[in-house]
Amino acid sequence: MKKLFIKTYGCQMNVYDSARIADLLTPLGYAAADAPDGADIVVLNTCHIREKAAEKVYSELGRLRRLKEEKAEQGGRMLIAVAGCVAQAEGEEITRRQNIVDIVVGPQALHRIPEMIARVERREGRALETEFVPDEKFDSLPAVRAEGPAAFLTVQEGCDKFCTFCVVPYTRGAEFSRPVAQIEAEARHLAALGVREITLLGQNVNAYCGAARDGNSWSLARLLNRLAEIDGLDRLRYTTSHPRDMSRDLIEAHRDLEKLMPYLHLPVQSGSDRVLEAMNRRHTRDGYLHLVEKIRTARSVIALSSDFIVGFPGESDADFEQTMALVREVKYAQAFSFKYSPRPGTPAAAARKQVPEQVKSDRLQALQSLLAEQQAGFAKSCEGLSMPVLFEKQGRKAGQAVGRSPYLQPVHVDDAEHLIGEIHDVTIARALTNSLGGMLVAARPKAVAAA
Ligand code: SAM
Ligand code: SF4
């Protein structure tokens, strides 16, 4: 067997793509390795969303140079492939900066990796593919393999929204939705392999609009309703959503679909209308708050999550205070927050009023401590409650299993290793910093929702 090492950066869509790269290469005699040393091929599946993420790739390539040389000294060959959004955005520039790279492949062309490896092995020089052909990609990928009871399933790629800070429309291309039948077949296949929970992925997953056999375009809500009919599949989630695409039928799905978990990642980015407009978010602060109200009316207990950017060009102290006030009003169960990072080629990167680094750091710290407080508060509110947990893997302690609550929190339970792959009611005993500790409910009383 040849050794394949894949390192994944960035979002869950990259996690899905990396699994698909492994699915493509396994039939060709590659086995996954957990370190790059001595590997026959190393794939870096990269992220370009912030400068730090992109620079990490170049540092890693610096480290791989020595390993590639060592392998060559022993008469072997280590191929190095850069996949994902850095590959898409920087193309040949990567091989100019790091001549050890043999393959550069954008996210829409990853199905061509086997053929690119063959070309490089025939010593035809380097291979580069950065075309946008998402339908070809999904048509050409082999059947998925399941690695545990929870799986990702990409249903939508790309973005047409062009927020002024974001590279995604340039690296992942225009919005594309996979056809309903293709998604349903993949979900049924995963369920037959023992998968109990599927998270539907897309850069704008709730903009999903896929062709169905009935000749119509189906919304995400309709797709979720169809997938909820699959026996054995007990839990559905989706991410990431844009507030503008939070349609009525999707909100109703949160009310009506038992299998749809009470968790929603709904990025707002900022609480200031002035900043939202400069970001080209095409939603307002009030519009977002009204949406949150509608969602909570449909499903009273739901874990809300968001993304925030602090220090967007021109953001004043008053704008930032509006973000803090919005957070206090919404009360998030969990969230991600970032300092604005200027991305080459995006409109905001050229704005004159960039915010000083120290101001960005101070704002990020203030926001993150408020979000951490809210996350801890939500976790604390779960103490003493019973809730169904899908056990996914072994914990750190012998016999322990770790699963997910309906609200996506990791839950540790002792003496539950034998239950991996199953859903059981757990009483939450304590809230820890980033997880919950619980005990199995012996008899099965009716699950109580978190407050
Ligand atoms: N489509 C999603 C939405 O509109 O909410 C976001 C997808 S993006 C891959 C994930 C997050 O990265 C964004 O929500 C934003 O908070 C963050 N992000 C994107 N560009 C950024 C930048 N230039 N600087 C800092 N954070 C950024
Ligand atoms: Fe980026 Fe905006 Fe598209 Fe989200 S909606 S992927 S933030 S451009």
Image: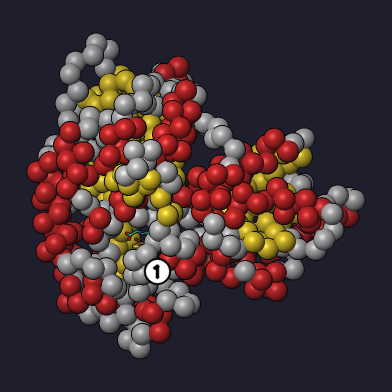
| Percent coordinates x, y for residue 6 in the rendering | 62, 48
| Percent coordinates x, y for residue 139 in the rendering | 55, 44
Nearest the viewer among 160 and 416 is 160
Total numbered labels placed on residues in the image? 1
Quarter of the figure with the N terminus: top right
429 is higher (above) or lower (below) than 139: above
- Look at label 1 and name its amino acid: Cys
**Can see residue 318?**
yes
Left or right: 230, with 398 as reference point: left
326 is higher (above) or lower (below) than 400: below
What residue would you read off at disc 1?
166
Nearest the viewer among 132 and 429 is 132
303 is higher (above) or lower (below) than 162: above
Left or right: 422, with 288 as reference point: right
The outermost residue toward the top is: 443
Quarter of the figure with the C terminus: top left
| Percent coordinates x, y for residue 144 in the rendering | 54, 35
Q: Which residue appears at 12% of the width and 41% of the height? A: 298
Left or right: 188, with 237 as reference point: right
Q: Which colour scheme is used?
A: secondary structure
Counting other residues with Cα less than 10 Å from the Cα at mark 1, is it few (<14), some (14-19), or many (20 or more)?
Answer: many
Q: Which residue appears at 14% of the width and 62% of the height? A: 287
Nearest the viewer among 149 and 104 is 104
Q: In which quarter of the image is residue 142?
A: top right
Q: Which residue appears at 54% of the width and 57% of the height? A: 133
**Can see residue 152?**
no
Q: Circle 1 sits in a helix, a strand or a loop, which is it?
A: loop
Asked if disc 1 is less than 8 Å from ligand 2, the answer is yes
Left or right: 194, with 407 as reference point: right
| Percent coordinates x, y for residue 408 in the rendering | 32, 39
Q: Which residue appears at 41% of the width and 18% of the height? A: 419
Task: State which image quarter holds ligand 2.
Answer: bottom left
